[in-house]
Image (cartoon, helix red, strand yellow):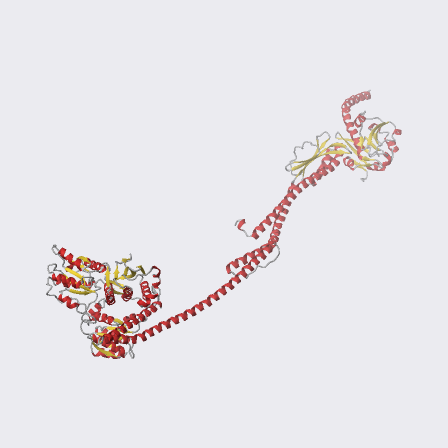
Amino acid sequence: MSFKQASIQTKLTLLILFASLFALVLAVASFGIYERSNFRRDIAQELSTLADTLGANTAASLAFDDAKTAADMLSALKANPNIETACLYNSSGTLFASYRRNGLTPSFAAPALQPDGAYFQAQSLTLFRAVFLNGEKTGAIAIVSDLNAFRSKMIQYLKIATMVLVFASLITYLISARLLRTITNPLLQLAEVATRISQEENYSLRVVQLGSDEIGKVVASFNQMLERVQERDLALVGLNDDLELRVTQRTQAFEKARDVAEKASQAKSEFLANMSHEIRTPLNGIIGMTELALDTELTSEQKEFLQTVRFSSDALLGVINDVLDFSKIEAGKIDLEDTDFNLRDTLESTVRSMAVRSNEKGLELACSIAPEVPEFVRGDSTRLRQVVTNLIGNAIKFTEQGEVVLCVKSPETSSGGGDSLFHFVVSDTGIGIPEDKREIIFQPFSQADTSTTRKYGGTGLGLTITTRLVQMMGGKIWIESQVGKGSQFHFTLLLKASKMTRQVAAGPSPLLRGVKVLVVDDNRTNRRILDGMFTNWHMKPKSVESADLALAELADTRESAEPYALIVTDMHMPGMDGFDLVDCIRKNPGLTNAKIMMLTSGAHQGDMERCKSLAIAAFLSKPIRQVELRDALGRVLAVGNLGPATGATPASLAPLKSAPKGKALNILLAEDNPVNQKVAKRMLEKRNHQVIVAGNGVQALEALGKQAFDLVFMDVQMPEMDGMEATASVRAQEKLTGVHQLIIALTAHAMKGDREICLAGGMDDYLTKPIRPEELDAILNKYSATEASPKSLAAAAGLPSET
Amino acid sequence: MKAALRLLMVGLVLLNFAEIGRAQQSEEYHVKAAFLFHFAQLVEWPADALGDDKNPITLCTFGKDPFGGDLDTTLQGKSVGTRPLRIRHAKQIQEIPGCQLLFVGGNERKELPPLLAALKDSPVLTIGESDEFAKQGGMIGFSMDNNKVRFDINVDAAGRAKLKISSRLLLLAKSVIGKQP
């Protein structure tokens, strides 16, 4: 361990030990030196005394020349063992007598006579002394003494010194250790307390102050510091506690508030659900009965009144639906469906469903879907339909003249390949939205101009709902608009790729390839759409914007090698309309042999007759569904070179209003409410279907046990056994029989994912009360289009085949 | 005649011997002269016999002087302690007073008893040259031993004369007569 790392105690002990040892050694050494000189002096003194005595004693011998006596006297020196030799010289300096210590060689060289004094050699001391007899110098004496006495004395002295050193060191060590403890103990205590504090973070510990020296001061300062830290700690803890308390209080307050809010929200939702149910039931009666009344013989005045009633109740229903939707979205209670569906079909049928309204205002309504858009995707078709309906509805509402077009651009597929971002645009030629209002219209209960509310009506919830739905489906919505020229509502959606690849409309019929077609439409969008479709089918379209131009074009090309094989003309056109054009063509038989297809926005009574008389090959209502157009084209072109007079029955004359379509169905209606029973029964019977009514689930099951039905309308809420239970029972039996009974849910509950619940409960589809004729027709068409075999019905429902 | 011859013979021998003896004698008396001086150094006289510190110590020879002047030359100018040493040659007893040391030569054997009687108890250190001198009442008597000059001491005689002879001197004596102090 190096000196730096040693403890203070060790350091100080070593220091003190070293210092005291140094002092001791110094003392011993100086005493040694002092002793040595003392000894030399003493021995010289002793020898000279001895020499003096001997000299005095032998002086006479010298005087009387008595060497023998002198030698005798010298021999007295043997009493002193240190004396080696003694020599007596006479006055002439010659050796007179001598003494030699026993054990030494008798022969020796007498030291040469020297003046008086002590002469030290390495091992001996020689002392010369003159000899006097009564003041008369009679000779000299020399005494040689060894220094053994000195040496042994020195050795003795060293022994004692060593003992003293050892003893003194020991004592020093013990005392210093004891003394140091008074210094180091407080330090160690200080260090220990500091360590404990840093380990335990216990600032209430204190160091005991043992003195008022420097260490004592350090200890006092340390304690003061601890005091401060503790005070601060306490203050902090206090603050913390205070803070925690406040946080707890706040949290509790917040929780309370949140609970209250949640309860309020729940109450609101329940209230809304109940309200909706309570409003819908009577509304159902109103709408249904009005509908029925309108089909009876009425005066024009009565008819107008009833139509106003129907319009008002429809509007009321719309408001209720919007509010419900909005509250569902606000409550986050909308779950998105994730099923395969036919995107093209869905969009086209949705647009088509808006056609009545656009026709009423004389607007062009078109749907343009890029060829790259896949037919099937995965997602929530209902919500998509809602968004499109809403935006188109708005567009129609705010457009006085011109067109409303839904455009779907080719999707961007993400690199992962799973989701694709679809870009939809609903554009109109309406009033437009000023820049500063574009943000506001997405806020709930707001419209661009409050004055418009009166003019256009509406809750102002539509766009809010739409925006939320789009966001939920992973997209965004934005507006481009020019005041007075129109608006474009853009929105994007993330839709998954579908595994379904059944592309009915994908492969263009070979019949269509290379067919030259002339499109006559005053609406540019329509022309573009038709052009796009025809091109996509490898036809050779040419479009003109008026009947005059069409006639000119026909005249120009009739002599060409490749005349037009087909003319697709719009019915409503400014100036010369479609019928006039066909009239004109028929009157000039040389002009063209092309087949003629007529497109119309609204079919009127007598149109069919006119078509027949003009030998128009097909009569299609706008907006055109791609599949319908292609099928119609196929039929028209396949007929071959039929003369105009032959006039095959128009392949696809749009059904006249409310005309029942398909065969009569055998329908079971399970509904407890007498008004609703009556309304639904009458609506169905009016469509030539046979209806048996069951008052509740039990009766419905009984009826199902007695006979087979093509379709069951099942009210969800019924006494005794509700619709869900009854459906579950039916589905349970089907597991044995393997037959699939079509069941359509009827519910006034437009809340809490009723649709999802119904579908999960085994229902095939879903109708909300009050039943609206269009929706009923859509359902009936969907499920009665073909023979009601379960598999084909499933296919018609757009569901994947179960096989 | 015979006696004359014998005398002559003896005389011749003696002459021869005398020649040798003269050299020996010269050496002998040289030593004795030094001895005499040392005796003066090692004997203490009663205070009244000498008086003042500066008073000289007087060494006297009695009768014929065997030193032949050697004594004077050897001890000329010497002093014992603070006292100067004087040499005097006394021929008769009457001349003796004033002497502290009195050397009686060997030739004066006949004069010895009256001399000693006359000096009886007076503080004069008497030194003789015969073996019997100390026994006869003299204080220090020279003798020859192996050609070396030695001496005997009569302590009683000295004591009676109130002289203190240094023990160192006693130590060197061939024999000491009388009781030791």
Q: Position of residue A795 (x, y in %)?
A: 21, 67
User: A202 or A598: nearer the eye?
Assistant: A598
Q: Position of residue A399 (x, y in %)?
A: 28, 63
The residue at the point 50 percent across, 65 percent down is A242
User: A220 or A409: nearer the eye?
Assistant: A409
Q: Quadrant of residue A793?
A: bottom left
Answer left or right for B144 relative to A403: right
* Number of disc labels: 0
Q: Position of residue A222 (x, y in %)?
A: 56, 57
Answer left or right for A186 relative to A607: right
Q: Is residue A149 visible?
A: no
Q: Is residue A454 visible?
A: yes
Position above or below: A370 against A356: above
Position above or below: A423 against B156: below
Q: Position of residue B48 (x, y in %)?
A: 87, 36
User: A173 or A90: nearer the eye?
Assistant: A173
Which residue, as the protein is rendered here, is positioned at the far right? B94
Answer left or right for A143 relative to A560: right
Quarter of the figure with the C terminus of chain A: bottom left
User: A556 or A517: nearer the eye?
Assistant: A556
Q: Quadrant of residue A603?
A: bottom left
